[in-house]
Image (cartoon, coloured by chain):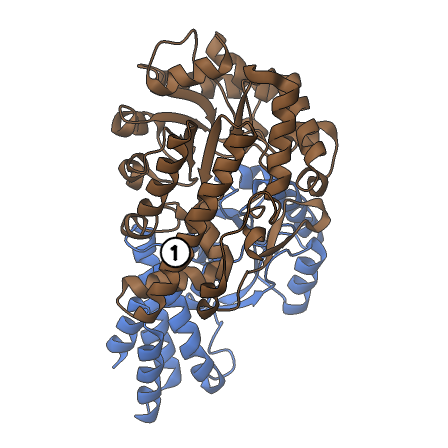
């Protein structure tokens, strides 16, 4: 059953994923096991396929969609802390940038990696990142930028977040950003795609 | 040599006095003359004034009055906004769902969206600068444009589901959208040529191999690009395909579109691109617009430009440029260093 759920996520078949999750719950399977060894495990494989260049953004999106639709059913059944045990990440695309696909993929894969993700959406002003970090006691903050025009805003965001809370780890990514740019801005890490962002967040938690 | 003759000869693989240089300088011009992007992207007189000022400041061979991705999409009914004078962003798609796309019509470039802004700017630039400067004109690619009609997420979800053999009922809507956007881009490009453009661009950001698979490109992008370039070439324009991202895996497909010039982003190894498709099409590229051109020193730019020339100048069919648009605020000395490289 778990393998079937995994495969349904990998195939990006939302209807089948939801149906299988419902069947598993009816059969008395533990919601945490379904989440960890079915849904999350499937999405992790999707991230690996993306990293290897076998999957592209549309394929990731339908898998993320399948996982999200199943999570609607399963999330209320999970014990407190059962989802998001890896830490808390605040995510958002920097002010001036309204691109959300890449950011959404990062959010899904972070959730897949066990993080509690506070998704601030797109066009996020610096004060909003800082307020969310404080409110949710975040461990990591992820800032995305697709447009080169918003890089100055990203640089200010990294500087101000670090000044406000030196302990929070800042990761940056998105098409406009490179590892060098991230370094120059003073970020703790840079990820070139959604899978690497999830891996990076885990590394930042460990280090 | 006159700029247009140099570009034309370079594209044809004929001898030139030097390699042409044409960095992607568009919104940068607004920064140069100190006007907000919301003015640059909506007022044709200001767009022309800024573009002409950039030409004069840098002695550009090629000028490019390009603003954002939505001047054409707005003709279909998409809404965009210049928030806080950042570059325009898509605020609302043209329709709520796939069923509604059958009610859409091909917009009129002389009337709809902000296409008239670009057309008038081109015509003003041509009048002021005369025939000696090449005008490169922008155009939103059919795949990206179709995604704006229903929203990018919905569009890509539909593409993925169809490729997995699910939700076949979406196929006619997707085909209809791409037919509409292809026709809209063809008409806009023809109007730009009529207004004075020499070189017309199909810029299809979403068709990048950083986003979609080669198989998706082959099915949902290539046939439509072929139509676009064939129509524009018939009208006598030089044509350019600009798709950013790491397209190493689809270089042959990019050349298959029929574009005269294929833009190569900095994420692609230029020597590899030259080897793979440099015999079939001209290449433009590929300095990193952010790391090198925006944040590097003039010396960094000169080194990278030299390396690009070493990788791709042999045998002609090469225009030195940037992988994508140079950000507003890029130091003018860095652009001068790029433009000077072919003269050294």
Q: Quadrant of the N terminus of chain A?
A: bottom left
The chain containing the residue under callout 1 comes to A
> Is B288 rendered above or below residue B116?
above
Q: Nearer the viewer, residue B204 or A91?
A: B204
| Chain identity for the colour blue used in the image | A
Q: Is residue A60 visible?
A: no
Hue used for the chain lettered B: brown
Q: Residue at x 42, y 31 (%)?
A: B235
Quarter residue A169 falls in? bottom right
Residue A3 percent coordinates (x, y): 24, 75
Q: Residue at x 40, y 78 (%)?
A: A70
Mark 1: secondary structure: helix
User: Dot 1 corresponds to which residue?
Assistant: A57
> Is B45 rendered above or below residue B18?
below
B16 displayed left or right of B192: left
Residue B104 percent coordinates (x, y): 50, 60
Quarter residue A184 falls in? top right
Residue A194 percent coordinates (x, y): 43, 55
């Amino acid at each position: 059953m778990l393998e079937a759920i995994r495969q349904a996520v990998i195939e990006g078949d939302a209807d089948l994923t939801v149906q299988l999750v419902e069947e598993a719950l009816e059969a008395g399977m533990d919601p945490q096991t379904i989440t960890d060894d079915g849904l999350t495990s499937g999405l992790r494989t999707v991230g690996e396929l993306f990293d290897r260049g076998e999957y592209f953004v549309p394929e990731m999106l339908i898998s993320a969609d399948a996982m999200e639709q199943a999570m609607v059913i399963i999330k209320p059944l999970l014990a407190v802390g059962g989802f998001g045990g890896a830490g808390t990440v605040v995510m958002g695309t920097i002010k001036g940038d309204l691109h959300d696909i890449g950011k959404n993929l990062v959010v899904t894969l972070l959730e897949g990696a066990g993080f509690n993700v506070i998704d601030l959406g797109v066009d996020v002003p610096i004060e909003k990142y800082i307020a969310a970090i404080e409110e949710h006691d975040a461990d990591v903050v992820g800032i995305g930028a697709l447009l080169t025009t918003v890089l100055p805003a990203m640089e200010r965001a990294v500087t101000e977040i670090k000044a406000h809370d030196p302990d929070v780890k800042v990761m940056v990514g998105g098409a406009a950003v490179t590892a060098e740019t991230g370094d120059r801005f003073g970020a703790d890490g840079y990820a070139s795609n959604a899978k690497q962002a999830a891996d990076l967040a885990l590394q930042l938690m460990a280090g | 040599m006159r700029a247009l003759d140099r570009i034309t000869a370079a594209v044809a693989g004929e001898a030139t006095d030097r390699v042409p240089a044409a960095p992607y300088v568009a919104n940068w011009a607004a920064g140069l003359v100190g006007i907000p992007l919301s003015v640059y992207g909506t007022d044709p007189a200001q767009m022309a004034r800024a573009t002409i000022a950039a030409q004069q400041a840098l002695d550009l061979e090629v000028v490019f009055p390009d603003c954002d991705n939505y001047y054409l999409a707005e003709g279909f009914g998409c809404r965009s906004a210049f928030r806080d004078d950042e570059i325009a962003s898509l605020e609302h798609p043209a329709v709520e769902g796939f069923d509604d796309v059958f009610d859409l019509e091909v917009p009129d470039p002389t009337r709809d969206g902000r296409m008239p802004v670009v057309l008038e700017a081109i015509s003003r630039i041509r009048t002021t600068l005369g025939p000696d400067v090449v005008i490169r004109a922008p155009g939103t690619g059919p795949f990206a444009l179709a995604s704006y009609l229903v929203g990018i997420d919905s569009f890509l979800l539909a593409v993925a589901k169809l490729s997995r053999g699910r939700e076949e009922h979406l196929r006619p809507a997707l085909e209809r959208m791409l037919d509409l956007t292809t026709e809209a881009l063809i008409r806009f490009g023809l109007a730009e040529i009529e207004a004075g453009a020499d070189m017309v661009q199909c810029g299809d950001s979403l068709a990048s191999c950083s986003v979609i698979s080669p198989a998706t490109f082959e099915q949902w992008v290539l046939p439509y690009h072929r139509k676009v370039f064939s129509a524009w070439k018939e009208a006598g324009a030089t044509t350019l395909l600009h798709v950013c991202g790491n397209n190493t895996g689809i270089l042959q497909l990019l050349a298959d579109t029929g574009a005269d010039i294929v833009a190569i982003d900095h994420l692609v190894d230029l020597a590899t691109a030259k080897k793979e498709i440099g015999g079939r099409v001209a290449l433009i590229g590929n300095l990193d617009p952010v790391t090198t051109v925006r944040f590097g020193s003039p010396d960094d730019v000169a080194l990278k430009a030299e390396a690009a020339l070493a990788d791709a100048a042999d045998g002609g069919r090469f225009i030195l440029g940037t992988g994508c648009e140079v950000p507003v605020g890029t130091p003018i000395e860095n652009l001068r260093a790029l433009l000077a490289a072919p003269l050294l």
